[in-house]
Amino acid sequence: MEVKEVTLDSLLSEVQGLKAEEYRLIQICATKVNEDEYEILYTFGDRYDEVNLRFSVDGKTPIKSISHLYWAAFLYENEIHDLYGIEVENMVMDYRGGLYRTAEKAPFK
């Protein structure tokens, strides 16, 4: 399993390359690293081969959606927005903070 560090600016081109190689999206997850830093991990697979793309974001900088390449990514992206408060630009389906009903807004922020 490969873990590739990417930048926010290179994310879309990396994902486009994996899509061209017919990798499928397995998951996207966010983790709070410290007060002002979140780690975002995208996992893609092709049979028994997995590639992880990882980058850090400050939580104030929006990330770009990959849902125009992998339609189902909109669920993960809405989850990241709702639970961590990280903005995701250009989702194919944006629930605008309403995918999850939580007692507090962005509980993992």
Image (cartoon, rainbow, N blue to C red):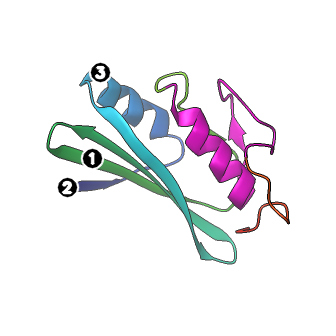
**In the rendered structure, which disc, 2 or 1, sits on the residue that comes first in sequence?**
2
- Where residue 4 sits in the image (x, y, percent)? 31, 53
**Residue at mark 1:** 51
- On screen, residue 33 above or below 14: below
Q: Visible in this render: residue 10?
A: no
Q: Is mark 3 on a helix, strand or loop?
A: helix
Q: Residue under label 3, please give it.
A: 20
Q: In this view, does 35 lie to the left or right of 75?
A: right
The reply to whether discs 2 and 1 touch (Cβ–Cβ < 8 Å) is: yes
Question: Which amino acid type corresponds to the residue marked 2 in the rendered image?
Answer: Met
67 to the left or right of 2: right
Q: Name the residue under label 2.
A: 1
Q: Which numbered disc, 3 or 1, marks the residue that appears first in the sequence?
A: 3
The magenta-colored residue range is 71-99
User: Within 10 Å of the Cα at label 1, are there few (<14), some (14-19), or many (20+) other Cα atoms?
Assistant: some
In space, the residues marked 2 and 1 are separated at their CA atoms by: 6 Å
- Identified at 80% across, 60% down, the residue is 102
Image quadrant of residue 33? bottom right
Please give the label number shown on residue 85.
Answer: none
Q: Where is residue 20 in the image (x, y as percent from the top left)?
A: 29, 21
- Name the residue type under label 1: Val
Q: Where is residue 100 in the image (x, y as percent from the top left)?
A: 74, 50
Q: Distance between the residues labelled 3 and 1?
A: 14 Å
Residue drawn where x is 75% and y is 56% of the image: 85
- Magenta segment: does it hold 84? yes
Q: Which residue is drawn at 55% across and 28% down?
A: 67
The answer to which of marks 3 and 2 sits earlier in the sequence is: 2
Q: In this view, does 24 lie above or below 1?
A: above
